[in-house]
Image (cartoon, rainbow, N blue to C red):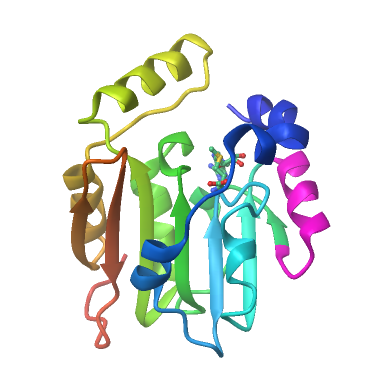
Amino acid sequence: MNIHFDWLAPIYDRLIGDHGTDRLAEFLALPADGILLDAGGGTGRVSAQFKDDINRIILCDWSKPMLKEAQSKGGLMPVNGKIESLPFAAGSVDRILVVDALHHFPNQPKAIAMMAQALKPGGRLVIEEPDIGRFVTKMIAWVEKVTLMGSHFHRPVEIAAMMDACGLKTSVETTERISAWIVGEKPLSDAHHV
Ligand SMILES: C[S@@+](CC[C@H](N)C(=O)[O-])C[C@H]1O[C@@H](n2cnc3c(N)ncnc32)[C@H](O)[C@@H]1O
């Protein structure tokens, strides 16, 4: 459901706080001359920190008020749309980042298929999600359920399976912290068709 983020947009960054990017930067290994797509990127809280590391950052989000906040940061190219109907040509994007957003996408297999298709061969999809195996994430999931946010959490291995099914070579990293990272790389010779 979109309306929650429309309301939260003006206070979102202050509410959620800063986001460290060290691990994400390692997974992304951004090419200086390339395109990063921040899918469900919201206010640009995370991807704005990569502005000096890559040529172009496109931020696609369903909520216009969230995009307005992203635009105010400068250096991000906001695109309004659903990831499930991603308006990008196949093989046009070097890296895709999804932070704390996948569980909000109504059709996650479709969203992942669209993102895999948009990646260039050799490109990477990096998903950071709260690990539903953790107690804290179960509490978050409960709060998002009772507030009718329409979230649906999958275990990291289930997300990896969705990415594998789209032809990405996938690995999972979990820690003692809430977040898990699921990283998929598109093979250079793309024999798989999504
Ligand atoms: C929890 S916020 C995370 C924002 C940002 N990635 C961050 O970590 O600060 C989730 C975002 O996903 C967006 N969103 C939800 N469903 C979407 C969809 N189907 N397509 C695009 N964006 C979507 C929401 O509008 C919201 O901005």
Question: Considering only vertical position in the picture, is 152 above or below 167?
Answer: above
Q: Which quarter of the figure is the N terminus placed in?
A: top right
Question: Considering only vertical position in the picture, is 150 above or below 78?
Answer: above
Q: What residue lies at 22% left-to-right and 44% top-to-bottom? A: 156
Q: Which quarter of the figure is the C terminus placed in?
A: bottom left
20 and 127: which is toward the camera: 20
Q: Residue furthest toward the top?
A: 146
Percent from the top left, x then y, of residue 21?
Answer: 47, 61
Main secondary-structure element of the magenta-colored stretch: helix
Percent from the top left, x then y, of residue 59?
Answer: 63, 60
Percent from the top left, x then y, of residue 80?
Answer: 70, 52
Q: Quadrant of residue 60?
A: bottom right
Percent from the top left, x then y, of residue 64?
Answer: 75, 43
Q: Is residue 84 left or right of residue 9?
A: left
Residue 87 showing in the rendered view: no
- Residue 64 is a magenta residue: yes
The stretch of residues the image draws in magenta is 63-77
57 and 111: which is toward the camera: 57
Q: Quadrant of ligand 1?
A: top right
Q: Quadrant of residue 47?
A: bottom right
- Residue 73 is a magenta residue: yes
Question: Considering only vertical position in the picture, is 105 above or below 18?
Answer: above
Q: What residue lies at 36% left-to-right and 44% top-to-bottom? A: 129
